[in-house]
Amino acid sequence: MTDGMNVHTSGTKGKKVQQSTFSQQSQSSKDIALFGDNQSVGQAPYRPDAPKIPSIFDGGYNPPEIPKKEQQAKIPLKTPEMIREDNERTVLGVYIGLSSQNISKENTANLIKNIKNIKFDNYKYTFLSFEAAGISLTDAIMNSPHLNTKQRQDCMNYLVDLGKKTADFGHQRSDDVIPKMKDLIKKYESAELDRANKKRLTADFKKIINRSDTLQTQTPARPNGRLDGTFKQGNTGDCWLLSGLQALSMTKEGKALLEKSVKVDAQGNATVTLGNVGKTYKISARDLKCSNELSTGDTDFRALEIAVDRYFREEMPDGEADIDGNTASKAFEVLVGSKNIKSAYNPRSIATMLDDVQTKGMNGRAAVTGIGGYVDPRDIVATNEKGERVKMYNGHAYTFKNADDNYVYLINPHNSASTIKVSREQYISKFSVLSIVDLKK
């Protein structure tokens, strides 16, 4: 998935940052909005002292069987070339049907036919093709002049059912989002559904699309209520959240706050309390297992992802429908509040903040950073602990670890087990935002 990012020059939209200072509240700034790559990870060992109670995590739990017809869904045996050609034909057909000025019965019939030609092989491809073109397939169908209300809802319900089918085939729970999606489809054209709820419908499509792309995924490790493992970002654009969680977990104060927020029982169920926003969420072992669109590795991080996602879906702060893309410092704002966050958005203020880091150190402070979508990441030379060059991503958030006279040290949420370094000079010139929260104040 291609990462994407929106950059503004200040904490308040429309105002420029003063060159001489980096002290800014980032609560309302859209400094970075991102999408993450799909990564896989080996499973962490079970907690040694965990009691062996039947659980979804250790094979002792047997979920209800998926009906045979659904479980053994037929996926056409085709070569990659044949699949690609089918995908391209399907997407082209939908494009032609949606964009044609010739409103006719034939055109309408062809459009519906092409939408219903979307199968397992090209389900995700079709949606992402529309997104790459700056179009939401949901909006394209629901706003099409070629379809009446019943036909639009019929096409949308077909896509929802197909998403459920592919997610169920991969043993990924989808019944938590399907009913809500169908309810939103019914209300889409009425005054009841505002822009934020329309955005939520698109967000829910992304969720089931990502689940359909993780067929037959491995069982996650049992959570233990401690952030003591590593993770890799999943197929959701929440690098802003994972980078913030990683940054907080690297401090004594932040780790204590997060581990106090996550409680688990012997069956692997979790209760997550987001104290700063006053919300508590009960997350079942099945919910944790059936969320493989999220991070893999330390399942306690996944529990926090689910909790923040639920908060966004219920409260929709600032119109956000889910955790797929947001500002670099948003995790700090949700988890600890915005009062003690300072952000820099231009080379001079970022350089000043680096000087501050070298003077005061990172004790009791957590930080995130990001690269704007307009930056060519191939120009950035970054290396890992072995001195090997690693790929960088634009429109992407990173955990900021520390800095010295020569280098800045970062963690990519694609793999939290590895530290990478970038020259101080390149960091100042290529990175677009640096946000630090002081946890001791």
Image (cartoon, rainbow, N blue to C red):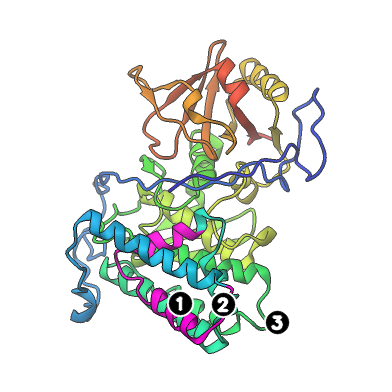
Q: Is residue 227 above or below residue 378?
A: below
Residue type, label 3: Ala
Quadrant of the snapshot with the C terminus: top right
Residue nearer the viewer, 306 or 145: 145
Residue positioned 57% across, 10% down in the render: 405
Q: Is residue 326 above or below residue 111?
A: above
Q: Residue 111: say if magenta.
A: yes
Residue type, label 1: Leu
Residue nearer the viewer, 355 or 140: 140
State the residue position of label 2.
102
State the residue position of label 1.
111
Q: Nearer the viewer, mark 1 or mark 2?
A: 2
User: Callout 3: helix, strand or loop?
Assistant: loop
Residue type, label 2: Asn
Residue positioned 57% across, 16% down in the render: 424
Residue 274 visible in the picture? yes
Residue 342 screen position, x and y as percent: 71, 34
State the residue position of label 3.
191
Q: Is residue 120 above or below residue 371?
A: below
Residue 290 visible in the picture? no
* Quarter location, residue 82: bottom left
What segment is highlighted magenta in the picture? Answer: 101-130
